[in-house]
Image (cartoon, helix red, strand yellow):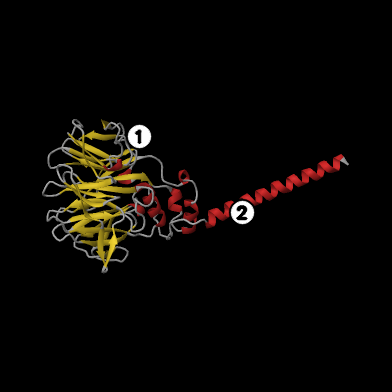
């Protein structure tokens, strides 16, 4: 009798465990397949990566960077020399640092309260900044911040600028800047990195290039249809804009006079200059002797490329913990190209000691390296 009871109890326990396991598996499956996510993924065609070969052959020219200490600050996402000869750097948390080119005499020049990702200077000496949280800003030499634009006129409607990213001031005063995503604003989606991940996973290609006229205060769409529109540079004749399309590993050349051009439709006003890059292109900065510098934020990840034509699996992926996302391994990489698309310099650090290289600023004596999260300003002597 006792033996029979033991067998019965064991059978019941086994049934409960089995039922519990089925319930857990069913709940996990339902979560992974049906839990709401903010993205509406779009399938796209990706070219097979060529890896670190040809002009991007692996090297260590970016390793062992010299460092400028920035105390408790972090994330020198954009760096440039100002008209006063001093070095300016955009930090996390909205701070803009000003210092001598060797890093001496550091001070907080201004604080936007957002996150400046790119800036340039106009003829009046004002810093013109693209702030991912605040829009297009003008900052006077004494650090006073003024908003220039937070919306754009498009198809007769007023559309918010959700993710101001890179900016340049043309010789005629026109301010060109990128609005990285028409879907995910960093202020609403947990910051710049989270919003960029959502936009690139979705691949809806809602990024655009905008132009602001300081005289009229009007902002218009130059071109649209980019998968995370990022870095921006002007051609030497002012007729073209170079645009980083981070989400699809390429750099465009677009007519600066274009009006609401859809780059998804073939046009003589837009062409892909550099395609199938080995990483995610970020800032574009004009250097010396015709060079344009670009930073690759991270190298491509085969798992991410493999999901290009699988939108449903990208939704499943977004339901997993963030550390499981295929964001790529740390790898330092900046390179320079000319206006014809020829790679003229390539610097890499396979060890990724200086995290998330987003760009490079070249002066007569130094090459400063931009970074999204570094706690120093890295540089190399030229």
- List x then y, in percent, for residue 167: 22, 51
Residue 279 in the image: above or below residue 254: above
Q: Quadrant of residue 214?
A: bottom left
Relative horizontal placement of residue 45, taking residue 162 as reference (left or right): right
Residue 7 in the image: above or below residue 149: above
Taking the spot 52% from the left edge, 56% from the top edge, the residue there is 35
Q: Earlier in the sequence, mark 1 or mark 2?
A: 2
Q: Quadrant of residue 347?
A: top left
Relative horizontal placement of residue 364, taking residue 117 as reference (left or right): left
- List x then y, in percent, for residue 81: 17, 41
Viewport quadrant of the C terminus? top left
Q: Quadrant of residue 224?
A: bottom left
Residue 280, disc: none
Residue 26, disc: 2
Asked if residue 376 shows in the view, the reply is yes
Asked if residue 231 shows in the view, the reply is no
> Which residue is at the front of the view, 262 or 309?
262
State the SS at label 1. Answer: loop
């Amino acid at each position: 009798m006792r033996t029979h009871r033991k067998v019965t109890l064991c059978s019941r326990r086994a049934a409960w465990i089995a039922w519990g396991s089925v319930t857990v598996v069913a709940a996990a499956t339902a979560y992974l397949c049906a839990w709401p996510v903010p993205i509406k993924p779009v399938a796209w065609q990706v070219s097979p990566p060529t890896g670190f070969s040809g002009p991007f052959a692996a090297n260590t020219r970016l390793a062992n960077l010299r460092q400028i200490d920035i105390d408790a600050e972090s994330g020198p996402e954009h760096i440039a020399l100002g008209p006063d000869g001093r070095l300016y750097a955009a930090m996390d948390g909205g701070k803009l640092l000003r210092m001598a080119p060797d890093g001496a005499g550091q001070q907080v020049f201004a604080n936007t309260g957002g996150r400046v990702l790119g800036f340039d200077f106009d003829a009046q000496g004002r810093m013109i900044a693209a702030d991912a949280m605040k829009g297009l800003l003008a900052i006077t030499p004494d650090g006073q911040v003024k908003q220039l634009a937070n919306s754009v006129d498009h198809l007769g409607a007023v559309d918010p600028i959700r993710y101001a990213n890179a900016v340049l001031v043309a010789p005629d005063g026109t301010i060109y800047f990128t609005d990285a995503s028409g879907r995910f604003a960093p202020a609403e989606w947990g910051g710049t990195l989270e919003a960029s991940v959502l936009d690139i996973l979705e691949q809806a290609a809602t990024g655009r290039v905008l132009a602001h006229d300081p005289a009229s205060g009007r902002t218009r769409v130059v071109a649209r249809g980019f998968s995370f529109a990022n870095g921006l540079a002007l051609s030497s004749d002012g007729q073209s804009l170079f645009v980083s399309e981070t989400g699809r590993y390429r750099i465009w050349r677009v007519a600066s006079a274009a009006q609401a051009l859809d780059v998804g439709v073939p046009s003589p006003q837009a062409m892909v200059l550099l395609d199938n890059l080995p990483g995610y292109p970020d800032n574009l900065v004009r250097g010396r002797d015709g060079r344009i510098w670009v930073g690759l934020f991270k190298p491509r990840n085969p798992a991410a490329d493999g999901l290009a034509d699988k939108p449903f699996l990208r939704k499943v992926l977004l339901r997993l913990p963030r550390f499981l996302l295929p964001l790529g391994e740390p790898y330092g990489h900046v390179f320079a190209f000319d206006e014809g698309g020829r790679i003229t310099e390539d610097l890499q650090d396979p060890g990724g000691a200086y995290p998330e290289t987003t760009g490079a600023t070249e002066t007569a004596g130094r090459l400063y390296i931009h970074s999204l999260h570094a706690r120093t300003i890295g540089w190399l002597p030229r």
